[in-house]
Image (spheres, rainbow, N blue to C red):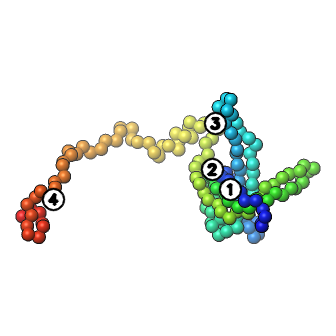
Amino acid sequence: MAGEPSIEFTGYAGEIKDFQDSSILNVSVHPGYTDKNTNQWVDKEPQFYGVRPLSNQAKDALNQVRQLKSQPNMSVKVLVNGSLSKRVSEKDGKRYENWDVAARTIAVLSAKPKAQQSGFQQSQQQYQQGFQQPQQGFQQPQQQYQQPTDPWSQPQDEYGNGQI
């Protein structure tokens, strides 16, 4: 890995491929920019990286990603830091470039349910149901505010105890 360029990026965890002696986490990055003329977001081609954890910390983070991804429709955003290398392969007459990262660090940045393309409002309502306030409304118990008593204004005994 000496002489290989370092890379740090955030992306979304995809499939985890397990091999005999290691695992590879596929991470997708969706770069883009704001067009100055239209002030609109312009998506660029997505990038895909095969991330192999090297350190114990990175391996632990991979296991955390594995647990989170075991939940249905879970989107997991990760930060990856490591050494970048390029692999070229050919399949069915097509040339493929693969970007591999030997990860020193993997960190889970967030994990949340994916929004569905159709029926977004319905899924959003279902997701938020557990957080809704009761329909009747919530009222706090009404209490009269009382000015706290100043312990030093009370008569004290010879030991400094209040209210003799």
Work out how far the residue at label 4 is from the one at label 1, CA to CA, in angstroms: 58 Å
Q: Which residue is labeled 1 in the image?
A: 8
SS for dot 4? helix
The amino acid type of the residue labelled 3 equals Ser
Task: Tell whether 75 sits left or right of 144.
Answer: right
Q: Earlier in the sequence, mark 1 or mark 3?
A: 1
Mark 4, other Cα within 10 Å: few <14 / some 14–19 / many ≥20? few
Give the camera-side residue of 15 and 5.
5
Q: Mark 1 to mark 3: distance in Å? A: 34 Å
Residue tagged by mark 3? 118
Q: Is residue 35 left or right of residue 158?
A: right
Between the C-alphas of marks 4 and 2, the distance is 56 Å
In this rendering, the label closer to the viewer, 4 or 2: 4
Mark 3 touches mark 2? (CB < 8 Å):
no
Secondary structure state at the residue bearing disc 3: loop
Which residue, given by chain and number where applicable, does mark 2 sit on?
75
Give coordinates of residue 119: x percent, y percent: 60, 36
Nearest the eye: 59 or 122: 59
From the viewer's perspective, tell me whether residue 20 is left or right of residue 91: left
Circles 1 and 3 in contact, beta carbons < 8 Å: no
Of marks 3 and 4, which one's residue comes earlier in the chain?
3
The x, y position of residue 45, in whole percent, is 76, 43
Q: CA distance from mark 3 to mark 4?
A: 64 Å
Question: What secondary structure is marked by label 2?
Answer: strand
- Nearer to me, 79 or 156: 156
Q: Earlier in the sequence, mark 4 or mark 2?
A: 2
The answer to which of marks 4 and 1 sits earlier in the sequence is 1
Q: Position of residue 162 (x, y in %)?
A: 11, 63
- The image quarter containing residue 98 is bottom right
